[in-house]
Image (cartoon, rainbow, N blue to C red):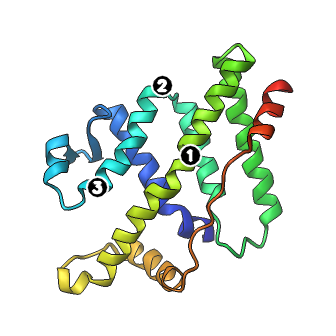
């Protein structure tokens, strides 16, 4: 439950990027079948700067030609990489699980890219995409929390489950307990993984 509370926005934004590139193109944002924003609609939106930040994700999915299997591994890594600053009770077990998905992502890349250099470069680009989620989601979170605080005045209704998750995070965010920012793997670690697959 703790992981979901801390990673729900990361997972929603990452999945939004995937839906966009799968159902339309990277030039659109596919929030839902009846809510697909074009470039022009984004420009007219009060959240244009947030849309631009989010659009980086589907654009990178398209540029890197990310496979569905790679996307699922990356999504699992994002879930297991977003933890409260104080850590988790079973941190060691979650770290092992996270490493197992990193190894699986490495395996998928090796299947696709035959040379060590190409594999290493692809791994770097995919982890860079995951790392970029921190700043993107921070923008979305701040907007979401601001809207939640002003919900009554703005006449905005949040679904009950989302309200519970936001309410549980809100005191921590306001107290300055932000999400931990993690660089997924160092260059040295990346090189070791691809030199010794």
Near-viewer residue (72 or 169): 169
> Residue under circle 1?
130
Q: Residues within 10 Å of mark 2 (few under 14, many from 20)?
A: few
Q: Residue at x 46, y 48 (%)?
A: 14
Cα separation between marks 3 and 1? 20 Å
| Element carrying mark 3 | helix
Cα separation between marks 2 and 3? 25 Å
Q: Earlier in the sequence, mark 1 or mark 2?
A: 2
Expressed as whole percent of the image width and height from the top left, the position of residue 66 reads 51, 29
Decide: is 51 above or below 119. Answer: below
Cα separation between marks 1 and 2? 15 Å
Q: Earlier in the sequence, mark 2 or mark 3?
A: 3
> Residue under circle 2?
65
Figure quadrant of residue 80: bottom right
In front of the other: label 3 or label 1? 3
> Residue under circle 3?
49
Figure quadrant of residue 47: bottom left
| Element carrying mark 2 | loop
């Amino acid at each position: 439950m703790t992981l979901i509370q801390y990673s729900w926005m990361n997972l929603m934004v990452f999945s939004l990027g995937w839906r966009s590139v799968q159902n339309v193109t990277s030039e659109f944002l596919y929030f839902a079948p009846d809510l697909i924003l074009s470039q022009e609609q984004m420009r007219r939106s009060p959240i244009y700067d947030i849309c631009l930040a989010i659009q980086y994700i589907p654009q990178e999915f398209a540029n890197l030609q990310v496979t569905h299997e790679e996307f699922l591994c990356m999504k699992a890594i994002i879930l297991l990489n977003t933890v409260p600053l104080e850590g988790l009770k079973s941190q060691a077990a979650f770290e092992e699980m996270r490493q197992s998905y990193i190894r699986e992502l490495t395996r998928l890349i090796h299947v696709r890219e035959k040379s060590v250099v190409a594999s290493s470069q692809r791994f770097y680009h995919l982890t860079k995409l995951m790392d970029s989620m921190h700043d993107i989601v921070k923008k979305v979170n701040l907007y979401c929390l601001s809207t939640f605080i002003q919900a009554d005045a703005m006449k905005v209704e949040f679904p009950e489950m989302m309200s519970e998750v936001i309410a549980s995070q809100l005191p921590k965010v306001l107290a300055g307990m932000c999400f931990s920012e993690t660089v997924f793997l160092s260059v040295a670690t990346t090189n070791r993984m691809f030199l010794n697959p």
